[in-house]
Protein backbone atom coordinates (compact mmCIF):
# COMPACT_ATOMS: atom_id res chain seq x y z
CA UNK A 1 0.00 0.00 0.00
CA UNK A 2 1.24 3.43 -0.89
CA UNK A 3 2.36 5.75 1.86
CA UNK A 4 -0.13 8.51 2.71
CA UNK A 5 0.77 11.96 1.44
CA UNK A 6 -0.38 13.74 4.55
CA UNK A 7 2.18 15.74 6.49
CA UNK A 8 0.39 17.83 9.08
CA UNK A 9 1.98 21.12 10.07
CA UNK A 10 1.75 22.45 13.57
CA UNK A 11 -1.13 24.84 14.11
CA UNK A 12 1.39 27.10 15.80
CA UNK A 13 2.79 28.04 12.39
CA UNK A 14 -0.50 29.63 11.38
CA UNK A 15 -1.12 33.24 12.38
CA UNK A 16 -4.87 33.99 12.32
CA UNK A 17 -6.02 36.54 9.82
CA UNK A 18 -9.23 38.36 10.61
CA UNK A 19 -11.72 38.90 7.82
CA UNK A 20 -11.26 38.57 4.10
CA UNK A 21 -8.36 40.17 2.29
CA UNK A 22 -8.47 42.64 -0.56
CA UNK A 23 -9.03 40.93 -3.91
CA UNK A 24 -6.16 40.88 -6.40
CA UNK A 25 -6.46 41.50 -10.10
CA UNK A 26 -6.23 38.24 -12.11
CA UNK A 27 -2.63 37.29 -12.87
CA UNK A 28 -1.39 36.96 -16.44
CA UNK A 29 -1.58 33.32 -17.44
CA UNK A 30 1.61 31.80 -18.79
CA UNK A 31 -0.51 29.59 -21.05
CA UNK A 32 -3.88 29.99 -22.78
CA UNK A 33 -6.88 27.95 -21.63
CA UNK A 34 -6.52 24.25 -22.34
CA UNK A 35 -7.36 21.04 -20.52
CA UNK A 36 -5.70 22.13 -17.25
CA UNK A 37 -5.31 25.91 -17.56
CA UNK A 38 -8.66 27.53 -16.85
CA UNK A 39 -10.07 24.19 -15.74
CA UNK A 40 -11.12 22.25 -12.64
CA UNK A 41 -8.98 19.11 -12.25
CA UNK A 42 -9.48 16.44 -9.59
CA UNK A 43 -7.10 13.88 -8.19
CA UNK A 44 -8.55 10.43 -8.95
CA UNK A 45 -7.14 7.52 -6.94
CA UNK A 46 -9.16 4.65 -8.41
CA UNK A 47 -7.38 2.41 -5.95
CA UNK A 48 -10.09 0.42 -4.15
CA UNK A 49 -10.45 -3.32 -4.78
CA UNK A 50 -12.57 -6.09 -3.28
CA UNK A 51 -12.29 -9.89 -3.41
CA UNK A 52 -14.08 -11.26 -6.43
CA UNK A 53 -13.80 -8.13 -8.58
CA UNK A 54 -11.08 -9.59 -10.81
CA UNK A 55 -8.37 -7.07 -9.83
CA UNK A 56 -4.88 -8.62 -10.10
CA UNK A 57 -3.85 -7.03 -6.79
CA UNK A 58 -6.35 -9.18 -4.89
CA UNK A 59 -8.02 -8.60 -1.56
CA UNK A 60 -9.44 -5.41 -0.06
CA UNK A 61 -6.88 -3.05 -1.61
CA UNK A 62 -6.91 0.32 0.21
CA UNK A 63 -10.01 -0.60 2.23
CA UNK A 64 -8.16 -2.71 4.85
CA UNK A 65 -4.78 -2.47 6.54
CA UNK A 66 -4.54 -6.24 6.06
CA UNK A 67 -6.00 -6.42 2.60
CA UNK A 68 -6.53 -10.15 2.83
CA UNK A 69 -9.05 -9.67 5.65
CA UNK A 70 -12.34 -7.82 5.20
CA UNK A 71 -12.52 -4.21 6.41
CA UNK A 72 -13.85 -3.75 9.92
CA UNK A 73 -13.50 -1.15 12.67
CA UNK A 74 -10.22 -2.83 13.65
CA UNK A 75 -8.92 -3.41 10.13
CA UNK A 76 -9.49 -0.32 8.06
CA UNK A 77 -7.72 2.44 6.19
CA UNK A 78 -10.70 4.76 5.69
CA UNK A 79 -12.10 7.59 7.80
CA UNK A 80 -15.15 8.41 5.64
CA UNK A 81 -17.93 6.20 4.33
CA UNK A 82 -19.06 6.37 0.69
CA UNK A 83 -22.63 6.70 -0.45
CA UNK A 84 -22.99 3.57 -2.60
CA UNK A 85 -26.52 3.97 -3.95
CA UNK A 86 -25.39 4.63 -7.53
CA UNK A 87 -23.28 1.47 -7.81
CA UNK A 88 -24.65 -1.64 -9.50
CA UNK A 89 -22.51 -3.99 -7.40
CA UNK A 90 -21.14 -3.68 -3.87
CA UNK A 91 -19.26 -6.05 -1.57
CA UNK A 92 -20.13 -7.10 2.01
CA UNK A 93 -17.66 -6.15 4.74
CA UNK A 94 -17.06 -7.12 8.37
CA UNK A 95 -18.32 -3.75 9.62
CA UNK A 96 -21.52 -3.71 11.69
CA UNK A 97 -24.69 -2.95 9.76
CA UNK A 98 -25.36 0.67 8.92
CA UNK A 99 -27.33 2.78 11.35
CA UNK A 100 -30.56 2.04 9.46
CA UNK A 101 -29.92 -1.71 9.49
CA UNK A 102 -28.67 -2.16 5.94
CA UNK A 103 -25.52 -4.26 5.41
CA UNK A 104 -22.27 -2.27 5.35
CA UNK A 105 -21.00 -2.67 1.79
CA UNK A 106 -18.23 -1.02 -0.23
CA UNK A 107 -17.46 -0.57 -3.91
CA UNK A 108 -14.55 -1.67 -6.08
CA UNK A 109 -12.78 0.81 -8.35
CA UNK A 110 -11.96 -2.16 -10.57
CA UNK A 111 -15.61 -2.51 -11.60
CA UNK A 112 -16.04 -0.57 -14.84
CA UNK A 113 -19.51 0.54 -13.76
CA UNK A 114 -17.99 2.28 -10.73
CA UNK A 115 -15.46 4.16 -12.86
CA UNK A 116 -18.21 5.02 -15.33
CA UNK A 117 -20.35 6.30 -12.45
CA UNK A 118 -17.53 8.47 -11.13
CA UNK A 119 -16.92 10.01 -14.54
CA UNK A 120 -20.64 10.50 -15.05
CA UNK A 121 -20.60 12.49 -11.79
CA UNK A 122 -17.72 14.54 -13.16
CA UNK A 123 -19.74 15.17 -16.30
CA UNK A 124 -22.87 16.13 -14.36
CA UNK A 125 -21.07 18.45 -11.96
CA UNK A 126 -18.80 20.22 -14.42
CA UNK A 127 -15.46 18.66 -13.48
CA UNK A 128 -13.23 19.04 -16.52
CA UNK A 129 -10.22 16.81 -15.97
CA UNK A 130 -9.17 13.85 -13.83
CA UNK A 131 -5.57 13.24 -12.77
CA UNK A 132 -5.22 9.46 -12.54
CA UNK A 133 -2.82 8.63 -9.74
CA UNK A 134 -0.08 6.18 -10.71
CA UNK A 135 2.23 4.94 -7.98
CA UNK A 136 5.24 2.69 -8.63
CA UNK A 137 3.89 0.44 -11.42
CA UNK A 138 6.84 -1.95 -11.36
CA UNK A 139 5.75 -3.81 -8.21
CA UNK A 140 2.65 -5.89 -7.47
CA UNK A 141 0.34 -2.91 -8.02
CA UNK A 142 1.42 -2.53 -11.65
CA UNK A 143 -1.08 -4.80 -13.44
CA UNK A 144 -4.00 -3.32 -11.51
CA UNK A 145 -2.90 0.24 -12.20
CA UNK A 146 -2.40 -0.60 -15.88
CA UNK A 147 -5.97 -1.89 -16.01
CA UNK A 148 -7.29 1.18 -14.20
CA UNK A 149 -5.77 3.42 -16.87
CA UNK A 150 -7.76 1.51 -19.50
CA UNK A 151 -10.96 1.80 -17.47
CA UNK A 152 -10.47 5.52 -16.85
CA UNK A 153 -9.79 6.13 -20.52
CA UNK A 154 -13.00 4.38 -21.51
CA UNK A 155 -15.04 6.32 -18.98
CA UNK A 156 -13.49 9.65 -19.97
CA UNK A 157 -14.16 9.01 -23.64
CA UNK A 158 -17.79 8.11 -22.93
CA UNK A 159 -18.47 11.20 -20.83
CA UNK A 160 -16.46 13.85 -22.63
CA UNK A 161 -14.06 14.31 -19.71
CA UNK A 162 -10.28 14.67 -19.96
CA UNK A 163 -7.70 12.68 -17.98
CA UNK A 164 -3.96 12.59 -17.55
CA UNK A 165 -1.42 10.40 -15.75
CA UNK A 166 -0.13 11.71 -12.42
CA UNK A 167 2.93 9.79 -11.25
CA UNK A 168 3.42 9.66 -7.47
CA UNK A 169 7.05 8.87 -6.70
CA UNK A 170 6.47 8.02 -3.03
CA UNK A 171 8.54 4.96 -2.15
CA UNK A 172 9.60 4.46 -5.77
CA UNK A 173 13.28 3.64 -5.26
CA UNK A 174 14.21 3.28 -8.93
CA UNK A 175 12.06 6.15 -10.11
CA UNK A 176 14.82 7.82 -12.13
CA UNK A 177 15.33 4.86 -14.41
CA UNK A 178 11.76 3.55 -14.48
CA UNK A 179 9.34 6.49 -14.65
CA UNK A 180 10.13 7.76 -18.15
CA UNK A 181 10.31 4.18 -19.41
CA UNK A 182 6.84 3.50 -18.01
CA UNK A 183 5.51 6.48 -19.93
CA UNK A 184 7.21 5.51 -23.18
CA UNK A 185 6.34 1.80 -23.08
CA UNK A 186 2.87 1.91 -21.49
CA UNK A 187 1.12 5.14 -20.64
CA UNK A 188 1.99 7.08 -23.80
CA UNK A 189 -0.43 4.81 -25.69
CA UNK A 190 -3.30 6.57 -23.91
CA UNK A 191 -2.18 9.97 -25.22
CA UNK A 192 -3.72 9.00 -28.57
CA UNK A 193 -7.17 9.13 -26.97
CA UNK A 194 -9.25 12.24 -27.68
CA UNK A 195 -9.96 12.22 -23.94
CA UNK A 196 -6.30 12.53 -22.95
CA UNK A 197 -5.61 16.01 -21.56
CA UNK A 198 -3.51 18.41 -23.59
CA UNK A 199 -2.14 21.81 -22.74
CA UNK A 200 -0.43 24.05 -25.28
CA UNK A 201 -0.91 21.19 -27.74
CA UNK A 202 1.11 18.78 -25.60
CA UNK A 203 -0.04 15.68 -23.67
CA UNK A 204 -0.14 16.40 -19.94
CA UNK A 205 1.81 14.41 -17.34
CA UNK A 206 2.22 15.23 -13.67
CA UNK A 207 5.02 14.09 -11.36
CA UNK A 208 4.08 14.36 -7.69
CA UNK A 209 6.64 14.24 -4.90
CA UNK A 210 9.90 15.86 -6.00
CA UNK A 211 11.61 17.87 -3.25
CA UNK A 212 9.50 16.70 -0.31
CA UNK A 213 11.47 16.63 2.91
CA UNK A 214 10.78 13.06 4.03
CA UNK A 215 12.25 9.59 3.74
CA UNK A 216 9.68 8.42 1.15
CA UNK A 217 11.08 10.75 -1.51
CA UNK A 218 14.88 10.90 -1.06
CA UNK A 219 15.73 11.89 -4.63
CA UNK A 220 18.46 14.39 -5.43
CA UNK A 221 17.82 17.58 -7.42
CA UNK A 222 19.90 16.18 -10.27
CA UNK A 223 17.82 13.00 -10.48
CA UNK A 224 14.56 14.95 -10.44
CA UNK A 225 15.70 17.46 -13.04
CA UNK A 226 16.84 14.64 -15.29
CA UNK A 227 13.37 13.08 -15.24
CA UNK A 228 11.63 16.40 -15.94
CA UNK A 229 13.95 17.21 -18.84
CA UNK A 230 13.49 13.79 -20.40
CA UNK A 231 9.69 14.02 -20.16
CA UNK A 232 9.69 17.49 -21.68
CA UNK A 233 12.03 16.31 -24.44
CA UNK A 234 9.29 13.83 -25.36
CA UNK A 235 6.99 16.77 -26.08
CA UNK A 236 5.00 16.59 -22.84
CA UNK A 237 3.52 19.39 -20.74
CA UNK A 238 4.81 18.49 -17.26
CA UNK A 239 3.12 19.48 -14.00
CA UNK A 240 4.96 19.31 -10.70
CA UNK A 241 3.09 18.25 -7.58
CA UNK A 242 5.41 20.04 -5.16
CA UNK A 243 5.67 20.81 -1.44
CA UNK A 244 3.69 23.67 0.10
CA UNK A 245 6.89 25.64 0.80
CA UNK A 246 8.58 24.84 -2.51
CA UNK A 247 9.55 28.43 -3.19
CA UNK A 248 11.27 28.95 0.18
CA UNK A 249 12.84 25.51 0.51
CA UNK A 250 11.76 25.02 4.13
CA UNK A 251 9.37 22.98 6.26
CA UNK A 252 8.02 20.30 3.89
CA UNK A 253 10.47 21.20 1.09
CA UNK A 254 14.13 20.30 0.87
CA UNK A 255 16.54 23.14 0.18
CA UNK A 256 18.27 23.34 -3.18
CA UNK A 257 15.31 22.32 -5.36
CA UNK A 258 14.27 25.66 -6.81
CA UNK A 259 15.78 24.90 -10.23
CA UNK A 260 13.83 21.64 -10.23
CA UNK A 261 10.55 23.40 -9.45
CA UNK A 262 11.19 26.08 -12.06
CA UNK A 263 11.70 23.39 -14.72
CA UNK A 264 8.01 22.41 -14.62
CA UNK A 265 5.46 23.92 -16.99
CA UNK A 266 2.93 24.07 -14.15
CA UNK A 267 3.36 23.98 -10.37
CA UNK A 268 0.73 22.48 -8.08
CA UNK A 269 1.68 22.79 -4.39
CA UNK A 270 0.22 20.29 -1.92
CA UNK A 271 -2.10 21.54 0.81
CA UNK A 272 -3.80 18.54 2.42
CA UNK A 273 -3.28 18.56 6.18
CA UNK A 274 -1.79 22.05 6.22
CA UNK A 275 -4.74 23.75 7.89
CA UNK A 276 -8.26 23.00 9.04
CA UNK A 277 -9.57 26.53 9.64
CA UNK A 278 -10.76 29.47 7.58
CA UNK A 279 -8.16 31.70 9.20
CA UNK A 280 -5.53 29.18 8.22
CA UNK A 281 -6.61 29.28 4.59
CA UNK A 282 -6.42 33.08 4.65
CA UNK A 283 -2.96 32.90 6.22
CA UNK A 284 -1.69 30.71 3.41
CA UNK A 285 -3.30 33.00 0.83
CA UNK A 286 -1.44 36.00 2.23
CA UNK A 287 1.87 34.45 3.23
CA UNK A 288 2.37 31.61 0.76
CA UNK A 289 0.04 31.51 -2.26
CA UNK A 290 0.31 35.17 -3.25
CA UNK A 291 4.10 35.04 -3.52
CA UNK A 292 3.84 31.66 -5.26
CA UNK A 293 1.72 33.22 -7.99
CA UNK A 294 4.15 36.12 -8.40
CA UNK A 295 7.07 33.71 -8.72
CA UNK A 296 5.25 31.58 -11.28
CA UNK A 297 4.29 34.63 -13.33
CA UNK A 298 7.88 35.83 -13.30
CA UNK A 299 9.09 32.47 -14.64
CA UNK A 300 6.29 31.85 -17.17
CA UNK A 301 4.98 28.91 -15.13
CA UNK A 302 1.28 28.09 -14.77
CA UNK A 303 0.04 27.95 -11.18
CA UNK A 304 -2.45 25.23 -10.18
CA UNK A 305 -2.94 25.43 -6.41
CA UNK A 306 -4.58 22.66 -4.46
CA UNK A 307 -8.11 23.34 -3.18
CA UNK A 308 -9.68 20.99 -0.70
CA UNK A 309 -13.00 20.26 0.98
CA UNK A 310 -11.36 19.66 4.36
CA UNK A 311 -10.94 16.55 6.47
CA UNK A 312 -14.43 15.30 7.33
CA UNK A 313 -13.06 13.08 10.09
CA UNK A 314 -11.62 16.04 12.00
CA UNK A 315 -14.63 18.32 11.59
CA UNK A 316 -12.84 20.80 9.32
CA UNK A 317 -15.48 21.10 6.62
CA UNK A 318 -17.85 23.60 8.26
CA UNK A 319 -20.66 22.29 5.99
CA UNK A 320 -18.92 23.53 2.85
CA UNK A 321 -17.58 26.91 4.00
CA UNK A 322 -14.02 25.56 4.25
CA UNK A 323 -14.11 24.25 0.68
CA UNK A 324 -15.60 27.45 -0.69
CA UNK A 325 -13.02 29.63 1.05
CA UNK A 326 -10.26 27.42 -0.37
CA UNK A 327 -11.66 27.86 -3.89
CA UNK A 328 -12.46 31.57 -3.47
CA UNK A 329 -8.97 32.44 -2.27
CA UNK A 330 -7.31 30.77 -5.24
CA UNK A 331 -9.71 32.22 -7.80
CA UNK A 332 -9.26 35.77 -6.49
CA UNK A 333 -5.52 35.16 -6.55
CA UNK A 334 -5.74 34.62 -10.32
CA UNK A 335 -4.55 30.99 -10.36
CA UNK A 336 -4.34 29.47 -13.84
CA UNK A 337 -6.23 26.34 -12.79
CA UNK A 338 -7.43 24.48 -9.69
CA UNK A 339 -6.54 20.99 -8.47
CA UNK A 340 -9.14 19.47 -6.15
CA UNK A 341 -7.75 17.07 -3.62
CA UNK A 342 -9.25 14.61 -3.87
CA UNK A 343 -12.15 13.03 -5.74
CA UNK A 344 -12.29 9.64 -4.02
CA UNK A 345 -9.86 9.86 -1.07
CA UNK A 346 -12.03 8.23 1.61
CA UNK A 347 -8.79 7.26 3.34
CA UNK A 348 -7.99 10.82 4.38
CA UNK A 349 -11.52 12.18 4.57
CA UNK A 350 -10.97 14.83 1.88
CA UNK A 351 -13.13 13.28 -0.86
CA UNK A 352 -15.72 15.22 -2.86
CA UNK A 353 -17.34 12.05 -4.25
CA UNK A 354 -20.72 11.11 -2.84
CA UNK A 355 -20.49 10.46 0.90
CA UNK A 356 -22.83 9.12 3.60
CA UNK A 357 -25.28 11.84 4.60
CA UNK A 358 -26.24 10.81 8.14
CA UNK A 359 -25.48 8.27 10.89
CA UNK A 360 -28.13 6.06 9.32
CA UNK A 361 -25.76 5.52 6.39
CA UNK A 362 -22.52 4.69 8.24
CA UNK A 363 -21.68 1.52 10.19
CA UNK A 364 -23.27 1.66 13.63
CA UNK A 365 -20.79 2.39 16.40
CA UNK A 366 -17.89 2.92 14.00
CA UNK A 367 -17.33 6.57 14.90
CA UNK A 368 -17.17 7.48 11.20
CA UNK A 369 -18.56 10.98 10.66
CA UNK A 370 -21.29 11.59 8.11
CA UNK A 371 -21.74 14.83 6.16
CA UNK A 372 -24.14 16.19 8.80
CA UNK A 373 -21.49 15.85 11.53
CA UNK A 374 -21.80 19.51 12.58
CA UNK A 375 -25.60 19.49 12.65
CA UNK A 376 -26.17 20.78 9.10
CA UNK A 377 -27.91 18.36 6.75
CA UNK A 378 -25.97 17.91 3.50
CA UNK A 379 -26.86 15.88 0.42
CA UNK A 380 -24.50 13.09 -0.62
CA UNK A 381 -23.50 15.11 -3.70
CA UNK A 382 -23.04 18.40 -1.83
CA UNK A 383 -19.29 18.73 -2.40
CA UNK A 384 -19.71 17.86 -6.05
CA UNK A 385 -22.26 20.68 -6.30
CA UNK A 386 -19.84 23.10 -4.62
CA UNK A 387 -17.28 22.06 -7.21
CA UNK A 388 -19.77 22.97 -9.94
CA UNK A 389 -20.11 26.50 -8.56
CA UNK A 390 -16.37 26.79 -7.93
CA UNK A 391 -15.67 25.89 -11.55
CA UNK A 392 -18.19 28.44 -12.74
CA UNK A 393 -16.51 31.12 -10.63
CA UNK A 394 -13.08 30.14 -11.94
CA UNK A 395 -14.35 30.51 -15.52
CA UNK A 396 -16.08 33.84 -14.88
CA UNK A 397 -19.55 32.37 -15.33
CA UNK A 398 -20.62 33.68 -11.93
CA UNK A 399 -19.17 36.68 -10.05
CA UNK A 400 -16.26 36.28 -7.67
CA UNK A 401 -17.82 35.97 -4.21
CA UNK A 402 -16.63 34.98 -0.73
CA UNK A 403 -20.15 33.80 0.10
CA UNK A 404 -20.80 30.16 -0.72
CA UNK A 405 -23.66 30.07 -3.25
CA UNK A 406 -24.29 26.33 -2.95
CA UNK A 407 -27.06 25.25 -0.53
CA UNK A 408 -26.26 22.06 1.41
CA UNK A 409 -29.48 20.19 0.58
CA UNK A 410 -31.23 21.96 -2.27
CA UNK A 411 -30.55 22.64 -5.89
CA UNK A 412 -30.88 20.36 -8.87
CA UNK A 413 -27.67 19.32 -10.64
CA UNK A 414 -27.45 20.20 -14.31
CA UNK A 415 -28.86 17.51 -16.60
CA UNK A 416 -26.28 14.93 -17.69
CA UNK A 417 -25.16 14.69 -21.28
CA UNK A 418 -23.69 11.92 -23.41
CA UNK A 419 -24.78 8.29 -23.18
CA UNK A 420 -27.07 8.06 -20.14
CA UNK A 421 -27.12 4.25 -20.28
CA UNK A 422 -23.36 3.69 -20.15
CA UNK A 423 -22.51 1.39 -17.24
CA UNK A 424 -26.05 1.41 -15.84
CA UNK A 425 -27.80 -1.74 -14.50
CA UNK A 426 -29.52 -3.86 -17.14
CA UNK A 427 -32.02 -6.70 -17.32
CA UNK A 428 -33.46 -8.80 -20.15
CA UNK A 429 -36.04 -11.42 -21.00
CA UNK A 430 -33.14 -13.85 -21.35
CA UNK A 431 -29.67 -14.35 -22.77
CA UNK A 432 -27.58 -17.00 -24.47
CA UNK A 433 -24.34 -18.31 -22.95
CA UNK A 434 -22.08 -15.39 -21.89
CA UNK A 435 -23.90 -12.78 -24.00
CA UNK A 436 -25.45 -11.01 -21.04
CA UNK A 437 -27.42 -7.74 -21.22
CA UNK A 438 -24.66 -5.79 -19.43
CA UNK A 439 -22.58 -6.19 -22.60
CA UNK A 440 -24.84 -3.67 -24.31
CA UNK A 441 -23.84 -0.84 -21.94
CA UNK A 442 -20.15 -1.64 -21.33
CA UNK A 443 -18.78 0.60 -24.10
CA UNK A 444 -17.10 -2.34 -25.87
CA UNK A 445 -18.27 -2.52 -29.48
CA UNK A 446 -17.16 -6.14 -29.79
CA UNK A 447 -19.18 -7.51 -26.85
CA UNK A 448 -22.92 -7.97 -27.26
CA UNK A 449 -26.18 -9.17 -25.77
CA UNK A 450 -27.93 -12.07 -27.43
CA UNK A 451 -31.32 -13.22 -26.22
CA UNK A 452 -32.64 -16.72 -25.87
CA UNK A 453 -32.75 -18.22 -29.37
CA UNK A 454 -35.85 -19.16 -31.34
CA UNK A 455 -38.25 -17.44 -28.93
CA UNK A 456 -39.49 -14.01 -30.02
CA UNK A 457 -40.37 -11.49 -28.67
CA UNK A 458 -37.32 -10.66 -26.53
CA UNK A 459 -36.43 -7.48 -24.63
CA UNK A 460 -33.51 -5.72 -23.00
CA UNK A 461 -33.89 -2.94 -20.43
CA UNK A 462 -31.60 -0.36 -18.81
CA UNK A 463 -32.13 1.54 -15.57
CA UNK A 464 -30.86 5.14 -15.92
CA UNK A 465 -30.83 5.57 -12.12
CA UNK A 466 -33.30 8.47 -12.15
CA UNK A 467 -35.95 9.87 -14.46
CA UNK A 468 -34.21 11.56 -17.39
CA UNK A 469 -35.37 13.37 -20.48
CA UNK A 470 -34.94 10.89 -23.34
CA UNK A 471 -34.97 12.08 -26.94
CA UNK A 472 -32.79 9.58 -28.81
CA UNK A 473 -31.88 5.91 -28.55
CA UNK A 474 -28.87 4.54 -30.46
CA UNK A 475 -28.58 0.81 -31.10
CA UNK A 476 -25.51 -0.94 -32.45
CA UNK A 477 -24.17 -4.32 -33.50
CA UNK A 478 -20.48 -5.21 -33.83
CA UNK A 479 -19.25 -3.20 -36.85
CA UNK A 480 -17.82 -6.23 -38.65
CA UNK A 481 -21.09 -8.19 -38.67
CA UNK A 482 -23.12 -8.63 -41.82
CA UNK A 483 -26.25 -6.62 -42.50
CA UNK A 484 -29.55 -7.61 -40.93
CA UNK A 485 -32.94 -6.17 -40.08
CA UNK A 486 -34.35 -6.33 -36.58
CA UNK A 487 -37.97 -5.40 -35.97
CA UNK A 488 -38.10 -3.57 -32.69
CA UNK A 489 -39.86 -1.01 -30.49
CA UNK A 490 -38.64 1.33 -27.76
CA UNK A 491 -40.59 2.04 -24.57
CA UNK A 492 -39.96 4.08 -21.44
CA UNK A 493 -41.11 3.92 -17.83
CA UNK A 494 -40.63 5.97 -14.69
CA UNK A 495 -41.26 3.03 -12.32
CA UNK A 496 -40.09 -0.04 -14.26
CA UNK A 497 -43.60 -1.47 -14.38
CA UNK A 498 -45.79 0.68 -16.58
CA UNK A 499 -44.23 1.41 -19.98
CA UNK A 500 -45.21 3.93 -22.64
CA UNK A 501 -44.20 3.67 -26.29
CA UNK A 502 -41.37 6.00 -27.32
CA UNK A 503 -40.91 4.54 -30.81
CA UNK A 504 -43.33 2.04 -32.34
CA UNK A 505 -42.38 -1.36 -33.68
CA UNK A 506 -40.69 -1.10 -37.08
CA UNK A 507 -37.98 -2.84 -39.13
CA UNK A 508 -34.57 -1.31 -38.36
CA UNK A 509 -31.67 -1.96 -40.73
CA UNK A 510 -28.22 -2.59 -39.28
CA UNK A 511 -25.68 -2.23 -42.09
CA UNK A 512 -21.85 -2.32 -41.94
CA UNK A 513 -21.77 0.69 -44.27
CA UNK A 514 -23.27 2.76 -41.42
CA UNK A 515 -21.22 1.01 -38.70
CA UNK A 516 -24.19 -1.24 -37.92
CA UNK A 517 -25.75 1.69 -36.06
CA UNK A 518 -29.41 2.65 -35.84
CA UNK A 519 -30.42 5.99 -34.29
CA UNK A 520 -34.04 6.32 -33.19
CA UNK A 521 -35.38 9.78 -32.44
CA UNK A 522 -38.43 10.08 -30.22
CA UNK A 523 -40.43 12.95 -28.70
CA UNK A 524 -38.59 14.13 -25.54
CA UNK A 525 -40.00 12.05 -22.71
CA UNK A 526 -39.25 11.52 -19.03
CA UNK A 527 -38.16 7.95 -18.29
CA UNK A 528 -35.91 6.06 -15.91
CA UNK A 529 -36.23 2.63 -17.52
CA UNK A 530 -35.74 2.17 -21.27
CA UNK A 531 -36.82 -1.11 -22.86
CA UNK A 532 -36.11 -2.31 -26.40
CA UNK A 533 -38.38 -5.15 -27.55
CA UNK A 534 -37.33 -7.21 -30.58
CA UNK A 535 -39.84 -9.35 -32.48
CA UNK A 536 -37.76 -10.45 -35.51
CA UNK A 537 -34.17 -10.62 -36.78
CA UNK A 538 -33.28 -11.56 -40.35
CA UNK A 539 -29.69 -12.39 -39.42
CA UNK A 540 -30.15 -14.72 -36.44
CA UNK A 541 -33.10 -16.23 -34.53
CA UNK A 542 -32.53 -13.99 -31.51
CA UNK A 543 -32.39 -10.37 -30.44
CA UNK A 544 -28.87 -8.94 -30.62
CA UNK A 545 -27.33 -5.62 -29.54
CA UNK A 546 -23.74 -4.59 -28.83
CA UNK A 547 -24.80 -1.14 -27.68
CA UNK A 548 -27.92 0.38 -26.19
CA UNK A 549 -27.30 4.10 -25.83
CA UNK A 550 -29.76 6.62 -24.44
CA UNK A 551 -29.39 10.35 -25.06
CA UNK A 552 -31.21 13.43 -23.88
CA UNK A 553 -30.75 15.21 -27.21
Image (cartoon, rainbow, N blue to C red):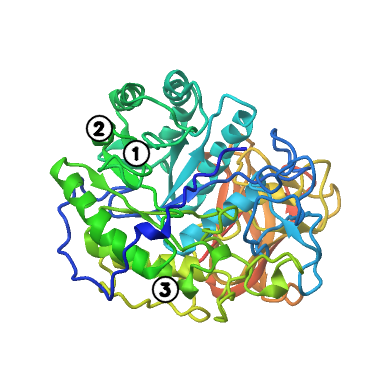
Neighbourhood count class around disc 1 (C-alpha, 10 Å): few under 14, some 14–19, many 20 upward:
many
Tell me, yes or no, if residue 107 can be seen here.
Answer: yes
Q: Is residue 119 above or below residue 516?
A: below
The residues bearing labels 3 and 2 have C-alpha atoms spaced at a distance of 35 Å
Residue wearing tag 1: 240
The picture quadrant where one finds residue 420 is: bottom right
Element on which disc 3 rests: helix
The residues bearing labels 1 and 2 have C-alpha atoms spaced at a distance of 9 Å
Element on which disc 1 rests: strand
The picture quadrant where one finds residue 259 is: top left
Q: Position of residue 303 (x, y in %)?
A: 26, 48
Proximity of marks 3 and 2: CB atoms separated by less than 8 Å: no
The residues bearing labels 1 and 3 have C-alpha atoms spaced at a distance of 28 Å
Q: Position of residue 542 (x, y in %)?
A: 78, 48
The picture quadrant where one finds residue 349 is: bottom right
Foreground: 348 or 183?
348
Q: Position of residue 330 (x, y in %)?
A: 29, 60
Residue wearing tag 2: 263
Element on which disc 2 rests: loop
Looking at the image, tell me whether mark 1 or mark 3 is earlier in sequence order. Answer: 1
Residue wearing tag 3: 321
Q: Which residue appears at 73% of the width and 44% of the height?
A: 60
Tell me, yes or no, if residue 534 can be seen here.
Answer: no
Amino acid sequence: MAVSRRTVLSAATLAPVAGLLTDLAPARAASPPGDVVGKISVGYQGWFACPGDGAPIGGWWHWSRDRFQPPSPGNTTIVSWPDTRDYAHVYPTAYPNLGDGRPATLFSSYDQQVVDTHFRWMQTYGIDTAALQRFNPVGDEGPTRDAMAVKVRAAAEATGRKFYVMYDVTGWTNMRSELVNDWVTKMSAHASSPAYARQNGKPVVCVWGFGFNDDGRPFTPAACLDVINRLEALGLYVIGGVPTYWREGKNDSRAGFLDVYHAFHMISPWMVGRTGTLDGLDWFYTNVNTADQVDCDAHGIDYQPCVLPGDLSSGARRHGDFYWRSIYNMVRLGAQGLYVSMFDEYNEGNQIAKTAETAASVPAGSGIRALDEDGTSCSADYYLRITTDGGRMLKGQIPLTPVRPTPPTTGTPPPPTGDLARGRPTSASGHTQAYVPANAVDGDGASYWESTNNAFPQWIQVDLGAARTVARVVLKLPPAWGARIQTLAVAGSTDGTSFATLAGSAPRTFDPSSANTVAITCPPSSARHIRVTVTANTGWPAAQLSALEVHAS
